[in-house]
Image (spheres, coloured by chain):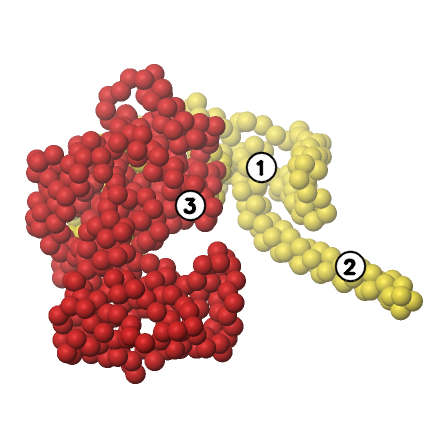
């Protein structure tokens, strides 16, 4: 009895010591991880932030580097502060703390650079010929198109190619996953091999193909080319998702009275929603950011897409007006950003594989 | 309701023959179990009945009409898969209503029927849940409701109880049996569990590597197994099988000579069920090697001149211990003899213990 009472506190103390040590170690790994994340995220965030800052502050003639430095002087401490906050609090308090930091940063920004902010650089949105406006002369043969023409073309390109890639890859992925046919394994290997070649190597043959088929300098031609190059990988991804859907729910649907097509649409397809979303988002972004092929295959100004528009804007007025280039860039990345924010919640589920539960 | 007939059915994929020369008649309203070890072609048979697989050869008849080429969706067959195969993106109610969608049942009527089916299998509280939020037993009952809701002419169950715990299995067993009696739907149950087959089905089809080994009631299979395979597959603990030589009305087994009833000579196998061996002081000498209490019964492992034998004794405890010397005997009509060459049962041949 006496021995036990003597030993009890010693044991408790030992446990406590171990707990303290474990807590300390956990905190150390946490801080190392967050320190790393903060360090690598600053150089990634900074260019985008500068782009935004330049677009709302630069005046004709050059970049206001004072504004840039002041803004960065607010942003970097804010990111670091958020990292530190993340280390010590979590849940609701983290959210509130984060909002607080954002609010403080915003006030600081307004105080430091507020008087330099303006929307002049965004006048390309309503001014049809921005280059003529800046240079003070319109060259009759080379009138610059409105940004909305390029925007519409880009949207048409991205949306159509997304629809195309999504439809074909879904159907082909399903077929490859479910049916046995001669040449199937060769086809599957082909998908991977095709994906391994850099698309650039095909640029001359594709140009000739477009030229001879009369699709040169048409959006249709570019859409077909980009979609074709996207497809092998998309099909491969979709096949993987279909592979994860068990056969028996499909058989079950068919004994329940569904035709093969109804079973596919009503039972199988809902299981691969996440895969379709991923393939769709990637296809859209690919179409939206496409540069190489539009640069090669499109000439007419009326066919310009956003990437060409931004290229020609910077080509024509670089050195004159950085602000406008930055503003066009902000406008250009906005749709991708919105799409990402909207779909991000679903895309992170992808790690769970094709089907939940 | 339908009378199902399989005539010389074969199914093969390339060189793999899954089912071979299957002949079977299932009467209207009958409950038939297909029993056999893993990979013997039970599921394949079931899927052919459902219309998911098309037989490679032979005729499949529903009420006398050939349905080989009729698609699954037109057969009005309800099926419960081993994995239950509930649609993960639909809640329980929409799962149960799914088959009605293709029958053009109006929505209100469909809801009513779904509720009725859910009541029948006691899942009416779970209608709004998603399949992932259900336990195995609940999923199984939902799958059953979905199979029953369209009032199928044939109900197919592919090892429906194999994922359940022992207690749930017991209650689902009687539940399914009750549902089958109430609805009178012709039912085929696939299982590798003999207890499931014997307790639920009117008749049992024993399969082995794609072929039917025997068709009969539980009693037929137990008392008159057609082959060594059936004899050893049916009954727990398994039957004792000892090899012997028959000649001149005598059967030589190990160091023992038994008397033979019936006309046979050559290499045979003698089968004795553990529960048909009686213990008393006299008879064939035996030594207790091990005593295994099994709850209500006790299994004794004995060393005898015939070789090692398993003997089942009633009661949770027996007055025997390891090393005890006993005598054993059995009734001649309980002995089963097989031809060792063909592995078929020798009808009307029995062995009797030697006269003391
Ligand atoms: N699609 C298929 N292609 C090729 N062989 C198959 C196919 N389906 C089944 N088989 C083969 O047919 C045989 C019977 O399979 P089946 O699924 O009917 O067995 P089972 O009796 O249901 O077994 P278990 O109890 O394990 O479910 C097996 O040898 C299996 O490998
Ligand atoms: Mg099976």
Q: Nearer the viewer, mark 3 or mark 1?
A: 3
Write down which chain is painted yellow: A
Which secondary structure, mark 1? helix
Question: Which chain contains the residue that carries disc 3?
Answer: B
**The N terminus of chain A lies in quadrant:** bottom right
The answer as to whether callout 1 falls within 8 Å of ligand 1 is no
Q: Quadrant of residue B234?
A: bottom left
Residue farthest along the front direction in this orientation: B356
Same chain for marks 2 and 1? yes
Which secondary structure, mark 2? helix
Rendering coords of residue A207 (x, y %): 20, 47
Q: Residue B320: which numbered mark, if any?
A: none
Cβ–Cβ under 8 Å for marks 2 and 1: no
Task: Measure the C-alpha gap from mark 2 to mark 1.
Answer: 46 Å
Q: Which residue is mark 3?
A: B169
Q: Residue A20: which numbered mark, if any?
A: 2
Q: Which residue is mark 1?
A: A53
Above/below status of B124 relative to B204: above
Q: Nearer the viewer, mark 3 or mark 2?
A: 3
In the rendered image of the structure, the colour used to display chain B is red
Above/below status of B234 relative to A283: below
Same chain for marks 3 and 2? no
Q: Nearer the viewer, residue A103 or A98?
A: A98
Q: Residue at x 45, y 44 (%)?
A: B168
Cβ–Cβ under 8 Å for marks 3 and 2: no
Question: Which chain contains the residue that carries disc 2?
Answer: A
Q: Residues within 10 Å of mark 1 (few under 14, many from 20)?
A: many
Q: Is residue A61 left or right of residue B299?
A: right
Cβ–Cβ under 8 Å for marks 3 and 1: no
Q: Residue at x 37, y 24 (%)?
A: B116
């Amino acid at each position: 009895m006496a021995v036990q009472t003597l030993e009890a506190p010693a044991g408790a103390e030992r446990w406590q010591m171990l707990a303290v040590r474990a807590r300390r170690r956990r905190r150390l790994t946490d801080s190392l991880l967050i320190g790393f994340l903060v360090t690598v995220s600053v150089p990634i965030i900074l260019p985008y932030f500068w782009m935004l800052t330049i677009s709302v502050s630069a005046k004709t003639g050059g970049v206001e580097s004072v504004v840039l430095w002041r803004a960065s002087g607010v942003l970097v401490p804010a990111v670091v502060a958020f990292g530190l906050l993340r280390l010590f609090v979590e849940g609701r308090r983290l959210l509130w703390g984060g909002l607080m930091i954002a609010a403080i940063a915003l006030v600081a920004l307004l105080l430091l650079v507020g008087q330099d902010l303006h929307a002049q650089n965004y006048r390309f949105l309503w001014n049809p010929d921005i280059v003529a406006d800046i240079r003070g002369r319109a060259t009759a043969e080379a009138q610059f198109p409105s940004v909305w023409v390029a925007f519409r073309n880009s949207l048409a390109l991205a949306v159509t190619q997304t629809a195309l890639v999504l439809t074909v890859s879904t159907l082909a992925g399903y077929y490859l996953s479910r049916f046995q046919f001669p040449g199937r394994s060769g086809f599957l290997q082909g998908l991977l091999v095709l994906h391994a070649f850099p698309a650039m190597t095909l640029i001359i043959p594709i140009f000739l193909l477009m030229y001879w088929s009369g699709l040169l300098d048409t959006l249709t031609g570019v859409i077909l080319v980009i979609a074709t190059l996207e497809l092998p990988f998309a099909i491969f991804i979709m096949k993987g998702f279909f592979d994860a859907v068990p056969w028996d729910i499909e058989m079950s649907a068919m004994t329940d009275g569904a035709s093969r097509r109804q079973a596919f649409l009503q039972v199988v397809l809902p299981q691969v929603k996440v895969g379709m979303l991923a393939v769709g988002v990637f296809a859209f972004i690919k179409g939206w950011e496409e540069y190489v092929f539009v640069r090669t295959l499109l000439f007419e100004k009326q066919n310009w897409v956003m990437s060409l528009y931004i290229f020609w804007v910077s080509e024509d007025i670089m050195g004159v007006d950085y602000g406008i280039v930055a503003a066009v860039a902000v406008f250009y990345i906005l749709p991708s950003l919105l799409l990402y924010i909207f779909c991000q919640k679903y895309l992170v589920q992808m790690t769970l594989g094709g089907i939940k539960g | 309701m339908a009378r199902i007939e399989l005539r010389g059915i074969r199914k093969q994929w390339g060189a793999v023959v899954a089912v071979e020369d299957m002949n079977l008649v299932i009467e209207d309203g009958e409950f038939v179990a297909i029993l056999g070890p893993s990979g013997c072609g039970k599921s394949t048979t079931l899927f052919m009945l459902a219309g998911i697989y098309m037989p490679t050869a032979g005729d499949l008849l529903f009420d006398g009409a050939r349905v080989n080429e009729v698609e699954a969706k037109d057969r009005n067959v309800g099926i419960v898969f081993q994995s239950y195969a509930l649609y993960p993106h639909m809640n329980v109610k929409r799962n149960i209503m799914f088959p009605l969608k293709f029958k053009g049942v109006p929505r209100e009527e469909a809801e009513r029927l779904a509720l009725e089916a859910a009541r029948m299998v006691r899942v009416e509280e779970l209608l709004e849940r998603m399949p992932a939020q259900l336990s195995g037993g609940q999923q199984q009952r939902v799958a059953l409701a979905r199979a029953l809701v369209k009032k199928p002419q044939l109900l197919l169950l592919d090892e429906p109880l194999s994922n359940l715990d022992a207690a749930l299995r017991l209650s689902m067993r009687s539940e399914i049996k009750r549902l089958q009696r109430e609805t009178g739907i012709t039912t085929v149950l696939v299982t590798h569990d003999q207890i499931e087959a014997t307790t639920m089905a009117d008749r049992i089809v024993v399969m082995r590597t794609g072929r039917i080994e025997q068709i009969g009631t539980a009693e037929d299979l137990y008392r008159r197994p057609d082959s060594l395979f059936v004899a050893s597959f049916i009954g727990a603990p398994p039957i004792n099988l000892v090899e012997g030589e028959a000649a001149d009305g005598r059967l030589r087994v190990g160091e023992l000579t038994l008397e033979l009833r019936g006309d046979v000579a050559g290499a045979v196998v003698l089968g004795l069920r553990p529960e048909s061996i009686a213990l008393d002081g006299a008879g064939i000498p035996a030594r207790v090697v091990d005593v295994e209490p099994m709850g209500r019964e006790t299994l004794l492992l004995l060393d005898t001149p015939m070789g090692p034998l398993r003997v089942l004794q009633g009661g949770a405890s027996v007055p025997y211990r390891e090393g005890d010397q006993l005598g054993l005997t059995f009734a001649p009509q309980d002995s089963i003899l097989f031809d060792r060459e063909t592995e078929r049962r020798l009808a009307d041949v029995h062995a009797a213990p030697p006269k003391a």
